[in-house]
Amino acid sequence: MPSIVNFLIKTKPLIIKNILLTEKLVIDIISYCKVMIEKIQNEILDCCKCGNLKKLKEVSIQIGTTPFIIIGESPAKDGWIISHKAFYNKDFKLQASGRTLEKLLNEINYSIKDIYFTECCKCIIEDRKLLTKASKNCFSILLEQIKSIPCRILVPMGIYPTQVLLGVKIKKFSNYVGKIFKINIEGEEYKVFPIYHPSPLNPKGYSGNISAFQLLREILN
């Protein structure tokens, strides 16, 4: 049984819009989600808005059991585009960003293997100057992915996914980290909770995120 089914069943009795989630209904929901994710992946493979850049061919979203989804910037050229596992390299070891994120997730009793995860940009964007345009190009697909899963808390890593989700131009990202912003997607309310990107090149990737993850734990509780 898919991990998300176990997660939803564990939280029973659960009512969404006055509908009691029985085990059968949960399984039906998961089947629908899988069909939608497959459909979205085909859209990604057919997209050429950023040219013929390399992209994730099999799946561009990691399904987890968390009530939140973490949203990165774009796939690393030596990451899950090769390993087929988010934050893992070709040797199936956690990359540097993954090790930092794992430490932060452990603080709230989760692990990378537990999380929903996707990238804002679906192609490898090596020139960071192109991230703003690429994020906008992929935004409609990102929204489709968000709508296909049960998470209502969106955790963007860094300025680019945060900007595209909030629809703003950010001048000082520290004013957004660890704060809650509400957005509406087709009548459904979502909370956006930005964090610093856990890249080893980011001096705030770990230390700057500690208080944010403490607040995230409070939100989840």
Image (cartoon, rainbow, N blue to C red):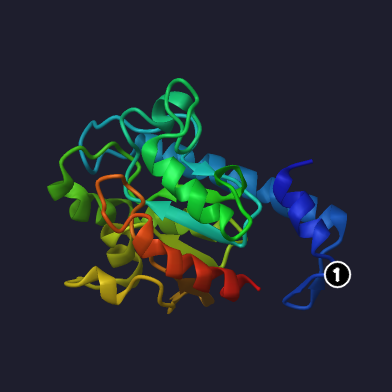
Left or right: where 134 falls relative to 92: left
Question: How many numbered circles does the render carry?
Answer: 1
- Given residues 162 and 42, the one toward you in this image is 162
- Given residues 219 and 17, the one toward you in this image is 219
- Picture layout, residue 13 above or below residue 30: below
Left or right: where 166 falls relative to 42: left
The residue indicated by pointer 1 is 13
Could you tell me the amino acid type at mark 1? Pro
Q: Secondary structure at mark 1?
A: loop
Asked whether residue 28 appears in the rendered view, the answer is: no
Residue at far top of view = 91
Left or right: where 30 falls relative to 216: right
Q: Residue at x 84, y 65 (%)?
A: 12
Which percent across, then down, holds residue 4? 70, 50
Q: Residue at x 43, y 32 (%)?
A: 80
Which percent across, then down, holds residue 134? 23, 49
Q: Residue at x 34, y 27 (%)?
A: 78
Which of the 4 quarters of the picture holds residue 125? top left
Which percent across, then down, holds residue 31? 71, 46
Quadrant, the N terminus:
top right
Quadrant, the C terminus:
bottom right
Left or right: where 97 falls relative to 65: left
